[in-house]
Image (spheres, helix red, strand yellow):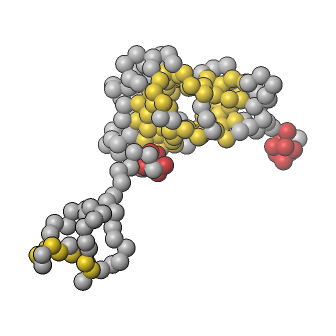
Amino acid sequence: MDDNSKLETEELLTCIHIHLFHPNQANRPLFHNLPLNKPHKMDAEDPVRLGRDGQTCIFVLNDTSVSRKQLSIQAYRKAGSQFLSFMIQNMSQKVKLMVGGYELRYLERAELENKVLCRFGRYELLIWQEPGDSENKFEVLFETCNTPPSQELGIDVPCKPPVMDTNLPWRNFENGAPVSQEPLESDETVILV
């Protein structure tokens, strides 16, 4: 059998992409135990466990601030569906897990949407799914990000003060003398010079 016919019959696996970010990732080897940029095949009945304990977790973060068992992602199928879906569960008794803006406490779980931002401690994980055909296997692909996914998504980014669109310097005068450049009330007069 040649390679082309082998590719045609091979099942396409669902892939869980996990983009990782920590503000100190450049200075500390937080992710060196993870199979970065290499898809890792998993059986659908086996959960993706992430934490610092290599005995109980398949994927290990090299950080003492991470719980021994931090989180778990479990594949399942909805009734009548041939496609895999995924649930995420907080396995930490000490650290809360934020999933798409919702807080999960110890042992609470939520269904993973197609693309969701998860946070715990100072970690951010952007998790998204690439659908596949297989009913009993999937892949996990870990990648690091140089910027926080929350910043790329525009979440928790502070707003900048508004800027006048005239490109002219503006002054507020009261009785001929300049007044503060602070934002004006709607009944104050602005004179452009």
Residue 9 falls in which quadrant of the image? top right
- Seen from the viewer's position, the closer of residues 62 and 122 is 122
- Disc tally is 0
Above or below for 146 versus 175: above
151 versus 47 height, above or below: below
Q: Is 186 left, or right, of 129 in this rendering?
A: left
In the displayed structure, does residue 60 sit left or right of residue 131?
Answer: left
**Left or right position of 130 against 166:** right
Q: Is residue 31 visible?
A: no
Q: Residue at x 17, y 75 (%)?
A: 173
- The answer to whether 27 is drawn above or below residue 96 in the figure is below
Instruction: Specify whether residue 139 is in view.
Output: yes
Question: What x and y, as percent, mark residue 186?
Answer: 30, 63
The location of residue 79, given as percent across then percent down, is 77, 22
Which residue corresponds to the image point at 80% horizontal and 37% vertical from the top-left?
A: 10
Where 174 sits versus 116, above or below? below
Which quarter of the rendered picture does the C terminus lie within? bottom left
Frontmost residue, 176 versus 34: 176
